[in-house]
Amino acid sequence: MSKSLSWRGVIVLFIAVMGFVYLAPSLTGDLPAWWSNLLPRDKIHLGLDLQGGMHLILEVQALKAVESHLERVVEELKLDLRKSKIRYMEINRIGSDRVSVILMRSKDAKPFMDMAEGNYPDFELKSVSGDENQPTFQLVLISKARGRVMKMAVDQALETIRNRIDQFGVSEPDIRPQEDNRILIQLPGVKDPKRAMELIGKTALLEFKLVDEENSVEEALKGNMPPGDEILYEISIDRKTGRQAKIPYLLKKRTLLTGEYITDARVQIDSRYNEPYVSLSFDARGARLFEQITGQNIKKRLAIVLDKKVNSAPVIQDRISGGKAQITGRFTTDEARDLAIVLRAGALPAPVVIIEERTVGPSLGKDSIDKGFKSMLIGGAVVIVFMVIYYGLAGFIADFALVLNILFIMAGLAFFGATLTLPGIAGIILTIGMSVDANVLIFERIREELRLGKTPRSSIEGGYGKALVTILDAQITTLIAALVLFQFGTGPIRGFAVTLSIGIIASLFTAIFVTRIIFDYLYVLRRMKKVSI
Amino acid sequence: MEFIKPGINLDFVGKRKLAFLLSTIMIIATVLLLIWRGGPNFGVDFSGGVLIQIKFDQKRTPSEIKSSLASINLQDSIVQEFGEEGQFEYLIRIRHTDIELAGLGDKVKQALVSELGQGVEMRRVEMVGPKVGKDLREKALFAIFYALLFIAIYISGRFELKWVMSIVMALSLAFVVYICSSFGMTVTWLILIALVVAIGLCWFLKLKYALGAIIALVHDVIITVGAFALTDREISLSIIAAILTIVGYSLNDTIIVFDRIRENLKRFRRRPFEEVMNASINETLSRTILTSTTTLVVVVALFILGGGVIHDFAFAIMIGVIVGTYSSIFVASPVLLVWESKFAKGAKGKINSNK
């Protein structure tokens, strides 16, 4: 008996020491150097609701990615048809799943079908009945290919956003894909939520387009849009009054160059006006294109369009070689810096929409921690005093188990790298109330056995034996509820489920195993005659 | 020290008609209240919208705050004081879901700063798009449903060694849910039907312990929701977590009573079921009251001291602990008795004739 007792004692001592070791980094800021080299040094992770920060869920408009994929296919088709000398009336994208092709000559129908089936395996070719002389076809994107395009859009968006956030500089961001084309982003300790949101949500599609100077903007605004043109606006905000002004530009629809050739973008300060601007460097191909464009359009205006808004439209003074360009505007330094980041990280393949946002300020998080721990201390103290009054020495033993239990829960959080959230603190508090339950069950049973006139030793044995099954049954059902909660919950709720689960397991260990050791020591080894319970 | 003297024998089972009446009244009151209010008062998590917690450096009135939101056309938002006195904290709720929700927190801040000056601190912004709200609502209902289902399976298997039966029940329930969902039913109806079917299945498959437990749990959940409707509190994500905790806690109590009933049924084979049940409830009474007290103590501490964000969560658990304790004594066990008296007429005539 005494041998098994000391073994059990050693096990508890070992686990308690391990608990302290895992908990120490969270308790004190400066651990000795030898500690950090040998032992765990991770603090308990605090959830966003406790340390402040931002939680976002974005939805990637993946259909838009499919549409732009179809637009590219339209351009490819035009090229292919020209190459194969097939003459067409028009090629258009229809909706978000097909491309319609109208040919000019009926004899082209057969070669077109052969070409389409060979070159476009992602599409199903449908012949649409129409004019005999103008064979009409539809290329329908098969659902597998459609799914692939959408998935790629989400993957690419995820990668781009991760790049942007990395460059923005947030410690320990958490970015992960979710179902339904959604992306979860958690940014602890972000100071300026608005800026972060703009940085993440910006599509950052940079386009260079020529200004149509032969036709008038006024005419186009009235509805006489010249073919192949479009109107885009420059939006300027007066810093002092905050008033917005919209300046229309008539642009050629065709995009001459996009941001995909950018290799670098940096903020620089204009020495004359002391205003920041963004300088761009293109790769070799981009530089060649840029040189061509500028060379062919000297004295014309080239509009720099970002996300369908005109940024500026400078006049091309000379052919520009070397692949450098500048984007000026009335930027603040932060705006210029963020623009440089998004241009470097690249454009999103499709627009994103923020569908869920939760921001917690750092002061609220600190308040929550303070108040949570205060209620834990007071609630715990009342329970501890109560147990001693009600059960005497046995109550004291249960209290010891309770304190050990809290140590184990905290250490468990650190050990599993779980996150402590505000509902998690509530979970610990709840565990304090509930973990004495196991001991209450055991003690009530022991009292019953004692009333039957049994010896302390056999009463204790009987009490533990009979209560054990009940305790297990009761805790397993709570564990089931906690696991369901974990499965369904996100963020704070998940934190609650984790603390509750750890709490249940820890309380089983302390309330059954640990207290039994003390009882056995007192009444078996020391043969105490009277049970204080 | 002892609250409950040993050998106590209160007639709980005899009071079951009164308890049934009380429970029925509370449940009907909840249903009427919910119908009158047009459904539960869902928070932004489930209804979509924006919730903003702000702190001023001096006292403001809700109407003052409302009128300063007029410049961004949000004067019809709900503004209320929040948290402790003297902290000047307020909650702004924006229920529109037809406007651009992203970045609304910042717009609100700018509007407040321009009208009321710089002393505004944004403490918390929660924006949930309407689609996310709907998703979360469905997920939450399913979570509660699955928790009930798994617990029913566990209890049937564990208490009556009817693992096969309980799996049969689970499968037929899954089948019913599948059939109904293929007709495009809304989740609320789906869950209601599933619950009725589950209770019916328990009855006919003779899973009486599971039957008692499930009815008690549903009872607790409904009354907690009713308490929320009565005090005009919002049901948010963390309240769902609280409700699931209540489910676990109330079951805890129920199982301990059931365990004792089973044990005593083996010991006293000759005594009538009703008497055994009442004795079992009395024997566990001391523990029931003690554990409920310690749990209530810490939850009340959390309720009073935990701060505004956790306030409603603590309230839910508080109601749940009280109702859960009541239901394990006055609902779960009497349901067993009702089942026994219906079926016992044929199978166990003896037990009934002893009355």
Image (cartoon, helix red, strand yellow):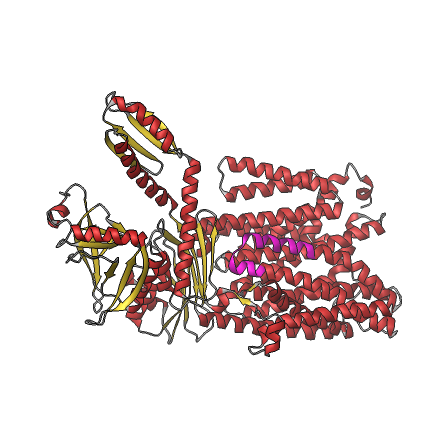
Whether residue A159 appears in this view of the structure is yes
Q: In this view, does B176 lie above or below B105?
A: above
* Residue at horizontal 58 percent and vertical 37 percent from the top: B176
B102 relative to A383 in the view: left or right: left
Q: In this view, does A502 lie above or below A254?
A: below
Q: Quadrant of residue A121?
A: top left
Q: Which residue range is magenta in the image?
A: A475-496
Q: How far across and down, in percent of the image, does residue A250 sit?
A: 16, 49
Q: How far across and down, in percent of the image, does residue B258 sit?
A: 74, 52
Q: Quadrant of residue A374?
A: bottom right
B308 relative to A443 in the view: left or right: left
Q: In this view, does B349 lie above or below B137?
A: above
Between A390 and A131, the residue placed more toward the observer is A131
A259 relative to B352 in the view: left or right: left
Q: In which quarter of the image is residue A385?
A: bottom right
Between A185 and B28, the residue placed more toward the observer is A185
* Residue at horizontal 37 percent and vertical 74 percent from the top: B59
Which is the main secondary structure of the residues drawn in magenta? helix
Between A398 and B39, the residue placed more toward the observer is A398
Look at the image and tell me in which quarter the N terminus of chain B lies. bottom right
Q: Is residue B133 magenta?
A: no
Q: How far across and down, in percent of the image, does residue A434 sit?
A: 67, 64
Between B189 and B31, the residue placed more toward the observer is B189
Q: Is residue A477 magenta?
A: yes
* Residue at horizontal 65 percent and vertical 75 percent from the top: A381
